[in-house]
Image: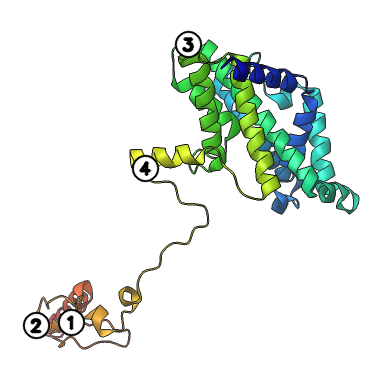
Amino acid sequence: MSEMASTLMQLHSLYKSVPSQYPMAGLCLLAASMAPDLKHAFLLHFWVSYLMGFGGGLVTSLLIMDPVKAPIAMLSNNTFGITFALCWWAVNYSPYNIGGRIHNLWPCKTVTKACANFCKASLIIARVDLAVRLYPGVVAAPLILGTLAAAPPELCVPTGAWYTASLSAVIYYLSTTVFQLLQTQEAAALVITLLVGQSLLSDITGYPLDVSYPVAYLAHKLSLIPKPAKAGAAVPKPKASETNLGSSKATSGISAPATSGTDQHKGAPTKYGVTATSGHTSAGLGGKAETEGKKKK
């Protein structure tokens, strides 16, 4: 146990020695490449890219409502705003798309993904710590704010990013606050290592690794809550026998008995395959015929 704690403390010291602007620049580059279909509308593309990369910090800052303890980066830091604007321009509008081509190279994109996960893990840790101080004894606050910090667009249809963020917030909160198994530095090193390691291994091996998958699978099985359908999943089509109104099987059971003398048309099918004695169609025709007959008399 002491060896693991010592290793985690060393990892934490290593992570703290990394200048914060470097991972932030990597996240800016990755966020700038997330909405290529909107490049024709530059202002919309700018804000969508910003929200996809830094929406977690924005949403949680608005929920905390304290510009000192949880400032909005775009409004409180000149370095951040300039860095994001330059990265956004370089990836999307540089001459001959030089910036975009360089960023799409495998080594560069692998590094920016690792930077993004480093920043997300750091924000999860910061939000959980702040929520524990602001709302002592409340369980929901650190878990909700910690999850939203890394997966704000997935409020309704969670994906792997949401499950990973939620698991990271749970691990950090339980290990530091509830059971006090680890110090905050040790738990922070563990969470950062999980997220960055998952990102690097996924890109190196080519397999979509997800540390949260076993936990999420078990949770859905035990709770009987179905996993949400993936976006773009095919909707099952009805059987042909249910849609073919012209077939004898489809029309044999839908005709209703006649309601008046004028409705006795012997159930002869029309050119659309629907019998004249079905439901409100026959009633409507019969009522109209009776009315016209009375007028003639």
Name the kind of residue labelled 4 in the image: Lys
| Quadrant that contains the C terminus | bottom left
Q: Which is closer to the viewer, label 4 or label 3?
A: 4
Q: Nearer the viewer, residue 98 or 38?
A: 98
At horizontal 55% and vertical 35% (from top left) the residue drawn is 164
Q: Nearer the viewer, residue 64 or 188?
A: 188
Q: Position of residue 110 (x, y in %)?
A: 74, 43
The answer to whether residue 264 is left or right of residue 24 is left
* Residue located beneath label 1 in the image: 289
Q: Are marks 3 and 2 in contact (CB under 8 Å)?
A: no
Structural distance between the alpha carbons of marks 4 and 2: 59 Å
* Mark 4 vs 3, N-terminal side: 3
Q: Secondary structure at mark 2?
A: helix
Q: Position of residue 229 (x, y in %)?
A: 46, 51
Mark 2 Cα-neighbour bin, 10 Å: few <14, some 14–19, many ≥20: few
Name the kind of residue labelled 3 in the image: Pro
78 in relation to 45, above or below: above
Q: How is the image coloured?
A: rainbow
Name the kind of residue labelled 1 in the image: Ala
Q: Which is closer to the viewer, label 3 or label 1?
A: 3
| Quadrant that contains the N terminus | top right
Q: Secondary structure at mark 3?
A: loop
Mark 3 Cα-neighbour bin, 10 Å: few <14, some 14–19, many ≥20: few
Structural distance between the alpha carbons of marks 3 and 2: 78 Å
Q: Which is closer to the viewer, label 4 or label 2?
A: 4
Structural distance between the alpha carbons of marks 2 and 1: 10 Å
Structural distance between the alpha carbons of marks 4 and 3: 32 Å
* Mark 2 vs 1, N-terminal side: 2
